[in-house]
Image (cartoon, rainbow, N blue to C red):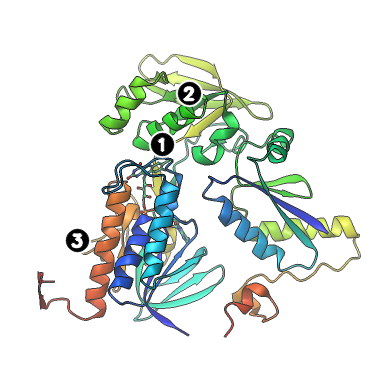
Amino acid sequence: MVKVEILKTHTCPWCPVASEVVKSIAREYENVDVIETFLETPEGAEKAKKLGVTSVPTILVEGKIFSVGVPDPDELRKAIEDAVVRSEGKNKKVPNSFHSFNVHGKRSCVRCSLFVS
Amino acid sequence: MVVYDVAIIGLGPAGMTAGLFASRRGLKTVIIGEVPGGQMALAHVVENYPGVERISGKELTEIMKKQCEKFGCEIVVSRVTDLELKGEVKKVKTDTGEFLAKCVILATGGRHRKLNVEGEDKFLGKGVSYCASCDGPFFKGKKVMVIGGSDSAVTTALYLKSIGCDVTLVHRRDSLRAEEANQKKLFESDINILWDSVVERINGDEKVESVVIKNVKTGETREFETAGIFIEIGMVPTVELAKKSGVETDERNFIKVNRKLETNVKGVYAAGEITGCIPQIVVAAGEGAVAATNAYFYLKGVYGKKTDWGTI
Ligand SMILES: Cc1cc2nc3c(=O)[nH]c(=O)nc-3n(C[C@H](O)[C@H](O)[C@H](O)COP(=O)(O)OP(=O)(O)OC[C@H]3O[C@@H](n4cnc5c(N)ncnc54)[C@H](O)[C@@H]3O)c2cc1C
């Protein structure tokens, strides 16, 4: 499992956008776990302090800061795929990333099925 | 595939008001936008939207959104990646699919202007911020600087003060652009103000530690210790997509419109901050209403004909 964590607060307008982007990309893979951590909670505040996070949304991939702000979809896919290779070995086949609805329009992909009639 | 009467790009006050007016006219309407509320969602308190004495930008966003949806307007939260605006049917491509519409209203507003100084990019998320309502709480009890002299800068400084930050406002002139009402609040607070001052450099190791400020009148530079720097020096219009698809802009890079808020492309309107209007919610909303109403007249083919309001 690759862990992607969204550090967010309730007052930040970009946080729901970042969550949506991360979740929709995570759905393209079989083994990505998305966690949302609100920094207003004591555990969240502790985590922010430990990592030196002073902006939200901040996205962590495998516990390391990947981006501040809404992540770029393609860069996040790449980071996830790299993390899969790192954690499961070089020979592990990386699941296909469905680049966009326009490219393949697969019904099996959650994002595509919303738009394929 | 469904062909909408109107596709509105942008979910700020201009886009949502356009959605409200278009759907109340009975037009099949979709609003596609990335951040619900746009810049309005960043305003912690709004006190100049008529009819509502005091409300947060987030709450006002929720109300506007619900009001649109009540009249059948569809809202899609997604990023628009390309526009094809020539021809009778326009195409809007997004991260999640395509939309077709007879009319398009561009309401993509603005995004934060950068200072363009050393350290600004390096310390983004490590003390440099463009969103006080997002990041302010991390700086409670710490020294912060707010850069700018507009209403956004002053209200940001007041907000940061209210949550317990030690705030200094840095402005490049000797007077503020902000409304008198906001200035009064600022002067009554004990927020320090550095007049005639510009940021030269942001310093630090892992995170922001200090800022070098230059007085533009005396030429003197001084280093100030700070943990955070909130940049509120205005907006640059988000016009790239529109320009790429043939919409003309003026010399300041705002979309060129006439009184009906028509652009140079037939069936394409623009509203809100991208037209260079006064950057306030009520003005953006007003432009949204004007653009949607004129889009309605265009779609109904009543341009040039007599109506209750005279010849349109
Ligand atoms: C901190 C702060 C405080 C403020 N306080 C006040 C106040 O008290 N009173 C007041 O009247 N005004 C205030 N303002 C100003 C006000 O918020 C703006 O003038 C107003 O929001 C402009 O509206 P708009 O709809 O034109 O654009 P915006 O609000 O900028 O909205 C633009 C929309 O377009 C979307 N968009 C852009 N590009 C794309 C794309 N490619 N795909 C999809 N969507 C896209 C954005 O996500 C957003 O939804 C404040 C602004 C700030 C920053």
| Mark 1: amino acid | Ile
Place of residue B81 in the rendered image (x, y in percent of width and height, measured from the top left): 51, 65
Distance between mark 3 and mark 1 Cα atoms: 28 Å
Q: Which mark is residue B233?
A: 1
What crowding class fits label 3: few (fewer than 14 Cα within 10 Å), some (14-19), or many (20 or more)?
few
Question: Is the distance from the Cβ of mark 3 to the nearest ligand 1 atom less than 8 Å?
Answer: no
Name the residue beneath numbered marker 3.
Answer: B259
B149 to the left or right of A53:
left
Write the residue at 61% across / 34% down.
Answer: B123
Amino acid beneath label 3: Arg
Count of numbered circles on the image: 3
Q: What number is the disc on residue B167? A: 2
Above or below, A2 relative to A53: below
Q: Chain of mark 1?
A: B
Give residue A78's mark.
Answer: none
Which of marks 1 and 3 precedes in the sequence?
A: 1
Q: Is residue B27 above or below residue B235?
A: below
Residue name at image x 31 percent, y 27 percent: B183
Q: Secondary structure at mark 1?
A: loop
Residue B60: x, y in percent?
39, 51
Label 1 Cα crowd, 10 Å radius (few <14 / some 14-19 / many 20+): some
Please tell me if label 2 and label 3 are on a single chain: yes
Q: Is residue B25 left or right of residue B85?
A: left
The kind of secondary structure element at disc 3 is loop
Q: Could you tell me the amino acid type at mark 2?
A: Val
Residue B39 visible in rendering? no
Q: Badge 3 sits on which subunit?
A: B
- Inspect this view and state whether residue B199 appears: yes
